[in-house]
Image: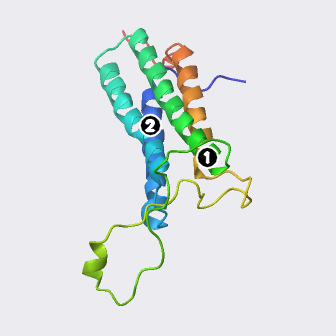
């Protein structure tokens, strides 16, 4: 089997795109599907918020001629960032399964249906409900033991961390120039 087409020079761009896509999916669920994030869900996003700028700095430094040692450092830094995201997501998933304690303030603040006899302008000034971290909105498969969004995020964060470490260990790949014409 051939190795993955990733190295420490290419990985920051892939990590940036993966972080942006992950945040895009999270915001899709929040805005389009109306699944508001809980407190721990927000904490999971922080890893991707941090990975983006780290990757952008690595990309800029590579354009400026950074050496392999510095690019390896950035790949390892990205791995640590994604591992932090894994720890938070795994903690959240374990909390949902009653296997780990959760933060004290992670419960629904308010709930219930919206009243129909109140003007919209007044409703917009009221505090909104924050979902409980304890209740998974959905699971795959739809069983009590299934993976929630937090569990899926834990697995995705682990994959990104592993790819970061793999990329850090790979020598820079260079374009194949064997078929290019010889310059006189």
The disc, 2 or 1, on the residue closer to the chain's N-terminal end is: 2
> Is residue 39 shown above or below 129?
above
Based on the displayed image, in which of its 4 quarters is residue 135 positioned?
A: bottom right
Could you say where residue 131 lies in the image, as x and y percent from the top left?
A: 49, 61
Q: Dot 1 lies on which element?
A: helix
Front-lying residue, 147 or 26: 147
What is the quadrant of the N terminus in the image? Answer: top right
Residue 21 in sight here: no
> Is residue 25 shown above or below 58?
below
Query: Disc 2 vs disc 1: Cβ atoms closer than 8 Å?
Result: no
Closest to the camera, between mark 2 and mark 1, is 1
Could you say where residue 76 lies in the image, as x and y percent from the top left?
A: 48, 19
Query: Residue 47 shows which numbered tag?
Result: 2
Q: What is the crowding at mark 1: few (fewer than 14 residues within 10 Å), some, or many (at least 20)?
A: some
What is the quadrant of the C terminus in the image? Answer: top left
The residue at 48%/49% (across/down) is: 41
The residue at 38%/34% (across/down) is: 50
Could you say where residue 10 lies in the image, as x and y percent from the top left?
A: 46, 26
The residue under label 1 is: 95
Based on the displayed image, in which of its 4 quarters is residue 119 positioned?
A: bottom left
The residue at 52%/19% (across/down) is: 176
Residue 106 in sight here: yes
Front-lying residue, 145 or 104: 104
On screen, residue 5 versus residue 77, left or right, reads right
Front-lying residue, 104 or 133: 104
């Amino acid at each position: 089997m051939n190795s993955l087409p990733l190295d420490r020079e290419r990985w920051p761009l892939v990590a940036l795109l993966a972080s942006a896509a992950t945040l895009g999916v999270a915001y899709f669920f929040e805005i389009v599907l109306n699944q508001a994030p809980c407190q721990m869900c927000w904490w999971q996003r922080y890893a991707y918020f941090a990975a983006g700028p780290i990757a952008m700095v690595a990309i800029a430094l590579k354009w400026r001629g950074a050496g392999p040692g510095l690019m390896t450092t950035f790949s390892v830094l990205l791995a640590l960032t994604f591992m932090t995201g894994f720890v938070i997501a795994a903690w959240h998933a374990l909390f949902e399964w009653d296997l780990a304690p959760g933060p004290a303030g992670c419960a629904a603040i308010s709930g219930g249906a919206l009243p129909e006899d109140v003007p919209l302008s007044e409703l917009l000034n009221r505090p909104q409900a924050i979902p409980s971290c304890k209740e998974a909105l959905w699971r795959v498969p739809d069983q009590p033991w299934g993976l929630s969004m937090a569990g899926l995020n834990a697995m995705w964060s682990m994959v990104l961390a592993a790819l970061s470490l793999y990329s850090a260990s790979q020598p820079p790949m260079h374009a194949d120039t064997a078929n290019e014409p010889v310059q006189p």
